[in-house]
Amino acid sequence: MPPCDPDTPTTSLPEHLQHLIEDRLVRGVIELPMLPQVTWQLMQMGASDEIDSAALTTLISQDQALAGHVLRVANSPMYKGYMPIVTLPQALSRLGIDLIYEIALTVSLQTRLFSVPGHSTLVRALWQHALGTALYAHKIAHILRQCTDSAFLCGLLHDIGKPLLLQMLVDLQRTSKDRLSPELIITAMERYHTQAGTLLAAQWNLPSLISTSISYHHDYTAAPEHTDLVLLVHLADLMAYFMLSPNTTQKDQLTNPALWAALGCTEADVTMLLLKRPEIMQVIAAMAV
């Protein structure tokens, strides 16, 4: 079962640890990573109705490391053609603006934000789930003829509070005598990741559709706005858990026709999405940095 699956049995958190975490979250005493300018601009693009190809090329070109990673992914077995891609305009021409945007955003976030020394296995699992959710969100939005870029962006960031909390727990462990077991870490991340993610969204001044998805993807009925998008991210989240662990009980919720009907999807749509698992696993492998 993948780390941080909501169906994973959780361990009770010691009371003093709860107080430490809650105190830091309430007072905002938590080290929030700075959002690189290029990444912030990519997020703003994704939250808009349309992405300009020239602006996207210029933006990616400003970060040589990012441009190199984008070209590496574009030349991976998943995407490469008969001739290698050596320039960003070539990549845009062959793969299309939406895919290049998603590759750029994915690489930018993974290299800068999903990194906690000493916890590479857990961070990799968090990253795979985040990307899986983003890819399923894109596909659901495409079915519904909604903005796929916004859906991908919200899916990618929905659990951004988890790596943030993981880093905070690592820091707490350094300053206390407590040894935090993997079970305690996962329980803490599950319990507090939406609060941590909400703090980060405010710090980064993210558009409301992103911050709302972060705050309410587990409680979509309480979302004050962007309700359809939050429900879409919720279902993409369940899809991603099922993709990474097909035996999970999430399938009962995935085949709940009422949820999908509320979004405007049919049973045939759900069946098609479930069959996309091998394709999405290939994309996740291709986008690994």
Image (cartoon, rainbow, N blue to C red):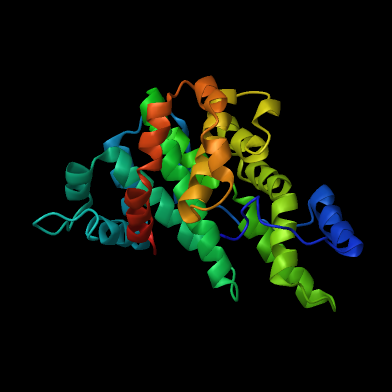
Which residue is depicted at the point 27% across and 62% down?
Answer: 72
Relative to residue 149, is residue 233 drawn left or right?
right
Relative to residue 203, is residue 157 drawn left or right?
left
Give the x, y percent position of residue 274: 40, 41
Given residues 138 and 153, the one toward you in this image is 138
Given residues 255 and 89, the one toward you in this image is 255
Give the x, y percent position of residue 100: 30, 46
Relative to residue 7, is residue 80 drawn left or right?
left
User: Quarter-wise, where is residue 107 in the image?
Assistant: bottom left
Give the x, y percent position of residue 287: 36, 57
Given residues 232 and 256, the one toward you in this image is 256
Decide if residue 46 is in sight here.
no
Give the x, y percent position of residue 232: 52, 32
**Quarter of the picture holding the N terminus:** bottom right
Which residue is depicted at the point 48% across and 55% down?
Answer: 244
User: Quarter-wise, where is residue 147 in the image?
Assistant: top left
- Eyeballing the image, is 163 above or below 222? below
The tally of labels here is: 0
Which residue is depicted at the point 38% across and 56% down?
Answer: 284
Looking at this view, name the residue that lies furthest to the left: 82
- Eyeballing the image, is 183 above or below 28? below
Which residue is depicted at the point 82% across and 60% down?
Answer: 12
Decide if residue 278 is in sight here.
yes
- Eyeballing the image, is 163 above or below 102? below
Given residues 25 and 63, the one toward you in this image is 25
**Quarter of the picture holding the C terminus:** bottom left
Looking at this view, name the residue that lies furthest to the bottom: 177
